[in-house]
């Protein structure tokens, strides 16, 4: 029997209904949630992803400022921009649309965002808060993955979870799963005996940046498979890290790409922006 599809678009749509209600309540009090998005014009598809966030913000009534980082801009000018946005009271959240070109130190750029506006929790302070189990904000992609599990009543408690990570996104998801009392193993594409590790997983989460790397022979029958991969093929198509067509025949639940983690990430960006607006309004009261 084929796996049940975890429909990220549907879950995100339901979440955004509540987000819109929150935005209307805030606006009735004179508070207009606002997100600033910065993206690199030299990075393929970044404009498209920024436009998707603009569209989502417009739909839910959230103000958005989009800054296109041009080829001539330097790391110093980008840092100065972030610092200026930190000091603009009307801006509640600042989001860096990764990746940026290699001349930019992404960690250095991320740590410029003031913690109260780091709605994707990409800076060191936010990451530290998450790893001591006291997050200010939860990183949006892992947060979206956990929301999908909750919506489909998949409880990680006492389940064996394997996370194949390629960045802080996977490591953050592992931390969230541990908070929910899962038994977590963290792997990467170079892990020895990766197949054997994956076959132990009740919940298999993949964020390796390696299109189609997880095949059916690596998945335990009945496992839940969460694909966080977003890879662009030479033909311009989006493909996940999981070989969907083969794996869906063995898994009990599986996320598609596209239509799984992508819409959820955007929904959680909106959620965290609204949360930031509430927190800042309370602090300034």
Image: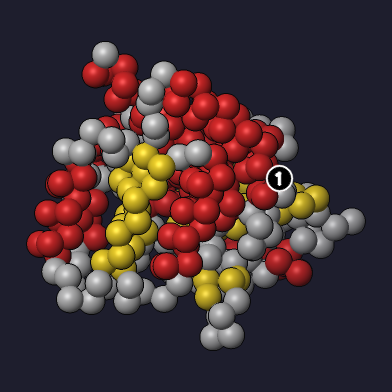
Q: Is residue 157 above or below residue 121?
A: above
Using the rendered image of the protein, determine whether residue 265 is visible from the camera's viewpoint. no
Which residue corresponds to the image point at 20% horizontal and 38% vertical from the top-left?
88
Q: Residue at x 54, y 63 (%)?
A: 229
Q: Is residue 158 left or right of residue 247?
A: left
Q: Which quarter shows the C terminus?
A: top left
Q: Nearer the viewer, residue 235 or 280?
A: 280
Q: Is residue 141 visible?
A: yes
Residue 267, located in which quarter of the rendered image? Answer: top right
In which quadrant of the rendered image does the N terminus lie?
A: bottom right
Position of residue 247 measured from the top left corner of the image (x, y, whole percent): 73, 64
* Quarter of the view holding residue 86: top left
Residue at far top of view: 285
Q: x%, y% of residue 3?
A: 80, 54
Left or right of 234 in this view: 277: left
- Disc 1 on helix, strand or loop? helix
* Residue 35, image x, y percentages: 37, 44
Q: How is the image coloured?
A: secondary structure
| x 49%, y 46%: residue | 57
Task: Say whether residue 243 is left or right of residue 52.
Answer: right
Q: Is residue 5 above or below residue 93?
A: below
What residue occupies the far bottom of the structure in this picture? Answer: 234
Q: Which residue is mark 1?
A: 10
Residue at horizontal 20 percent and vertical 67 percent from the top: 104
**What is the number of callouts on the image?**
1
Q: How would you rate the neighbour count of disc 1 (Cα within 10 Å): few for under 14, some for 14-19, many for 20 or more?
A: some
Position of residue 159 relative to residue 189, above or below, is: above
Residue 262 locus on image (x, y percent): 56, 55
């Amino acid at each position: 029997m084929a796996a049940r599809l975890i429909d990220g678009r549907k879950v995100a749509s339901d979440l955004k209904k509540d987000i819109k209600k929150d935005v209307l309540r805030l606006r009735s009090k004179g508070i207009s949630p606002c997100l600033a998005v910065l993206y690199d014009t030299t990075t393929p598809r970044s404009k498209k992803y920024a436009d998707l966030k603009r569209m989502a913000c417009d739909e839910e009534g959230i103000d958005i400022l989009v800054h296109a980082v041009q080829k001539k801009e330097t790391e110093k000018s980008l840092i100065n921009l972030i610092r200026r946005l930190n000091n603009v009271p009307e801006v509640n959240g600042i989001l860096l649309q990764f990746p940026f070109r290699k001349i930019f130190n992404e960690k250095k750029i991320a740590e410029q965002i003031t913690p109260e506006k780091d709605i994707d929790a990409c800076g060191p302070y936010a990451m530290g808060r998450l790893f001591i189990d006291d997050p200010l904000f939860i990183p949006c992609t892992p947060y979206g993955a956990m929301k999908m599990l909750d919506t489909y009543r998949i409880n990680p408690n006492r389940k064996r979870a394997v996370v194949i990570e390629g960045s802080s996104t996977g490591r953050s998801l592992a931390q969230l799963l541990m908070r929910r009392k899962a038994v977590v193993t963290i792997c990467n594409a170079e892990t020895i005996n990766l197949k054997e590790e994956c076959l132990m997983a009740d919940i298999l989460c993949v964020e390796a940046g390696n299109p189609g790397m997880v095949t059916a022979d690596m998945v335990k029958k009945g496992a839940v498979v969460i694909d966080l991969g977003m890879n662009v093929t030479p033909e311009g198509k989006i493909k996940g890290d999981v070989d969907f067509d083969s794996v869906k025949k063995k898994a009990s639940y599986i996320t598609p790409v596209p239509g799984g983690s992508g819409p959820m990430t955007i929904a959680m960006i909106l959620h965290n922006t609204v949360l930031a607006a509430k927190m800042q309004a309370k602090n300034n009261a």
